[in-house]
Amino acid sequence: MALQVDLQAMSPIPLNVAFEVQAGQILALVGPSGSGKTTVLRAVAGLFTPKTAKISVNGAVWTDTAAGVHLPVPARRIGMVAQSYALFPHMTAAQNVMAALGHLTAPARLAEALRILALVDLHDLANRHPAMLSGGQQQRVAVARALARGPQVLLLDEPFSAVDRPTREGLYEGIRSLRTVLNMPVVLVTHDMDEAQMLADTVVVLQAGQVVRAGLVADVLVDPLALRSIGLAEVGATLTAVVVAQEDDGITRLMCSAGPLFVPRIEAAIGTTLRLRVQAQDVMLARSRPEGISALNIVPVTVVAVRGGDGPGVLVELRAGNDRLLARITRRSGENLGLAPGVGCFAIVKSLSSTRVVIAAQNLPV
Amino acid sequence: MDWAALWLSLQLAAWTVAILLPVSVFAGRFLAYRQFRGKGIAEALVALPLVLPPTVFGFYLLVAFGAGSPIGAAWAGVFGQPLVFSFEGLVLASVIFNLPFAIQPAQRGFESIPLALREAAACCGMRPMTALARVELPLAWPGVVTAMVLCFAHTLGEFGIVLMVGGSIPGQTKTIAISIYDRVQGFDTAGAGAMAAVLLVISLTTISVTFWLSARFGRRFT
């Protein structure tokens, strides 16, 4: 199962985008507003047809302008979560989900709707109308409705933009855990690099309808120049870690592949796998293990690459066990430390408070 | 009290509403969703009966329905009787002069449905007619009901066009509004007053229903 997309247009915006997403993979379309992210998503859904377009899913052609093929929107088995969620206001949560179950017989729909709502942990609120649900709950109804069709492609249009940070991080967990259950290509539109990094496997960076960078998340997001040039926020890296102990002084001890980490209490069971986001600006580097320092988290790392542009800063890509870390330091510091590929040093994660810790999944696929 | 005239008016109003209901839904929906060249002209044509004096409008309909016109001749050819001064002619005239009342409120109703909801319906696999039944009408129905209520009330009260196209044939084309005029002409103030009161009550009721529905429309789902 794979989604293949190839689009070109001159209006309403110039567009030249091609990508492929495998089943079970999440592709993030990132870029500033007006870069054409949503347009691409709408093209896959069939809501918009660019001048030249070829879209196929599992070999079946949905759109091919050259051959005059355009599968009508209702005939495309897609799950779409719109930015506004677009829940039907006159229907309850369960009825919203049932609205996408037209392929089932009427008696079977309610049971199936309740089963899907349970999947997103909302079965208790099945009889509420959208106006009586919080933003995060509405988002989950929208996800449930999108999944109800048994979609061949899941399309998420900035699905987290209308909810606040804490809610969002809970929803990330939901999406990631669903991803392990559902075997379909997922396209996620976002302007939030954190989101792309937390959720996606591959990323396509768009600017003014053109692909600026594309590739694995880990490869693309270490290139700050490409991202900053198009106005995207600071990059970071993620560490995968397992909760090993809840200590008496309110600290949670984690273990990542490069060693132990200590963070303020995370309410998670021992054995839970976490993704920790470490922003590049929160990492200091030292050539020898520093002594007499307040920072708790000091990780042995190896320099993979030092990337610099015209400015005074450089981005150092580091290998920490099996994970990757990024450190933003000044060019002068880099030269003083003699940083070069292969050099070993220690990464000091200097500020826990600004290191966002996100519970991304209960059980990451190993 | 001229019960025959009231009954005729009610029949005329019922026929008008029955014919205009699908017109209201489909034309209102079309104008609400579609952008096309000449849309402004189409909307102006729909609104024309609002501004044209009823006698002028009635005059043109009389000419158009007359035996000398293609429409009148075709009608007479098929049904063997003239279109003017008949109940059928009255229904046709009523349908035409009620078009703005039938279409505009329904159009506003459909316009109030966000595009994202209609797209969501399609993405849920609903074909256009399913989406109309399950998403659009449940959201736009106050507009459609308002349209029908206005058509009904307006048909009961229309005078000028009915007189021009229908004349005043008792049991055929003599509606309650014309009957009231006749009673006044014949110095039967009491009869005219009774019938006028009936029309007043009907009009007040329908317009109250309309206002209640539009208030409800604004409050729903919030």
Image (cartoon, rainbow, N blue to C red):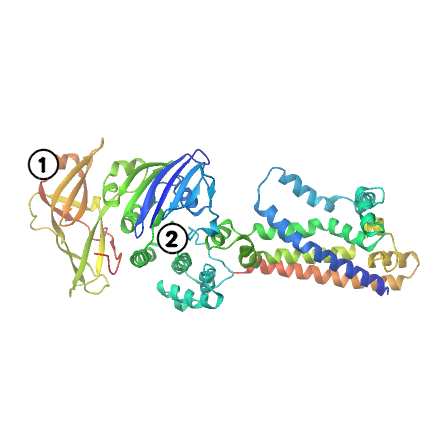
Quarter of the image that includes the N terminus of chain B: bottom right
- Determine contact: label 2, label 1, CB under 8 Å: no
Q: Is residue A36 above or below residue B177?
A: above
Query: Of the numbered discs in the image, which one, if any, rests on residue A152?
Result: 2
Q: Quick check: do tags 2 and 1 share a chain?
A: yes
The quarter of the displayed image where residue A366 is located: bottom left
Q: Position of residue A205 (x, y in %)?
A: 32, 40
**Quick one: label 2 or label 1, which is nearer the N terminus?**
2
- Residue A48 seen anywhere in this rendered image of the structure: no
**Residue at (32, 59) in percent of width and height:** A174
Q: Is residue A254 above or below residue A108?
A: above
Q: Amino acid at mark 2?
A: Gln
Viewer-nearest residue: A319 or A202? A202
**Residue at (65, 54) in percent of width and height:** B22
Give the CA separation, mark 2 to mark 1. Answer: 51 Å
**Residue at (82, 55) in percent of width and height:** B87
In the structure shown, which secondary structural element does the residue marked by tag 1 occupy? loop
* Residue occupied by mark 1: A338
**Residue at (14, 41) in percent of width and height:** A304
Q: Is residue B181 above or below residue A19?
A: below
> Mark 2 against mark 1, which lies toward the viewer?
2
The quarter of the displayed image where residue A33 is located: top left
- Classed neighbour count for the residue bearing mark 2: other residues with Cα under 10 Å, few (<14), some (14–19), many (≥20): many
Disc 1 chain ID: A
Q: Position of residue A251 (x, y in %)?
A: 17, 61
